[in-house]
Image (spheres, rainbow, N blue to C red):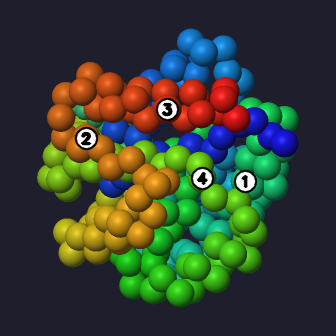
Amino acid sequence: MPLGKFITLEGMEGAGKSTNLAYLCSMLDAQGLVYTVTREPGGTPLAEEIRRLLLAPREEKMVPLCELLLVFAARAQHIEAVILPALKRGEWVISDRFTDATFAYQGAGRELGTARVNELEQFVQGELRPDLTLFLDVPLDIGMQRVAKRGELDRFEREQSEFFQRVRAAYLARIEADPERFIHIDASRELSIVQSEIAKAAGELMKNTKQA
Ligand SMILES: Nc1ncnc2c1ncn2[C@@H]1O[C@H](COP(=O)(O)OP(=O)(O)OP(=O)(O)O)[C@@H](O)[C@H]1O
Ligand SMILES: [Mg+2]
């Protein structure tokens, strides 16, 4: 039986996913745990090429179904080449975004609906689901202010606020439907406070893993 756990970080633009992922890794390091850190879309050279296709602003409008299928194409590669091998080696896997983002951005943001994403999730992932998902919640304006400092906006960051309202509502609905898996963190607060909540959640999971 693999001992590694699969943790995902979710949240909207500038919520602090990448920042807190680095913090989570430092916690695992401190415990001497072996882990693989990765991200979606992406995580393998091929999947990173698909990521570029997804994020680059372009003249031709990418239809929502094309976007959804590209996300899952990248995910199929990522799961088979990176996530499952790492879990089978007993490593922890920490991913910056995973399928909750697809429910939020493609299912709700692009209005493709939950049913289609559910079907693809089953088809591509089989039984694979995260053990723990940290949802970092910030008001859109704060997140966008944080992201704006980075310069050029990607294809998603250029969306209108109605799009992001649908995205956030979908994340909240998923948390409500599966409260065991999610930790909902108010990430508009000071980083040290956000990190103390992350430490608590990840600490519980580590403790339970050792006892198991
Ligand atoms: N709690 C916080 N308070 C203040 N600033 C923060 C906080 N968390 C993150 N930041 C800062 O906000 C910026 C965006 O953070 P980060 O890149 O981690 O977000 P992200 O969720 O990964 O964004 P993206 O969706 O664009 O990948 C960074 O400059 C980071 O230092
Ligand atoms: Mg990031």
Label 4's element?
loop
**Pointer 4: what residue?**
130
Q: Are marks 1 and 2 in contact (CB under 8 Å)?
A: no
**Location of residue 205 by image quarter:** top right
* Distance of label 4 from label 2 (alpha carbons): 21 Å
- Answer above or below: position of 188 versus 13: above
Which residue lies at the image location 28% right of the left edge and 70% below the top edge?
169
Which residue lies at the image location 73% right of the left edge and 65% below the top edge?
127
Q: Position of residue 25 (x, y in %)?
A: 54, 25
Q: From the viewer's side, name the closer residue of 70 and 85.
A: 85
Marks 4 and 3, the one that precedes in the sequence: 4
Please tell me the numbered disc located at residue 78.
Answer: 1
Q: Position of residue 56 (x, y in %)?
A: 48, 60
- Label 4, residues with CA under 10 Å away: few <14, some 14-19, many ≥20: some
- Label 3, residues with CA under 10 Å away: few <14, some 14-19, many ≥20: few
Circle 2 or circle 3, nearest the eye: 3
**Pointer 3: what residue?**
204
- Label 2, residues with CA under 10 Å away: few <14, some 14-19, many ≥20: many
Please tell me the numbered disc located at residue 187.
Answer: 2
In the image, 65: left or right of 140? Answer: right
Marks 1 and 4, the one that precedes in the sequence: 1
Label 1's element?
helix
Marks 1 and 2, the one that precedes in the sequence: 1
Circle 4 or circle 3, nearest the eye: 3
Q: Determine if residue 15 is in view.
A: no
Q: Are marks 4 and 2 in contact (CB under 8 Å)?
A: no
> Which image quadrant: the N terminus?
top right
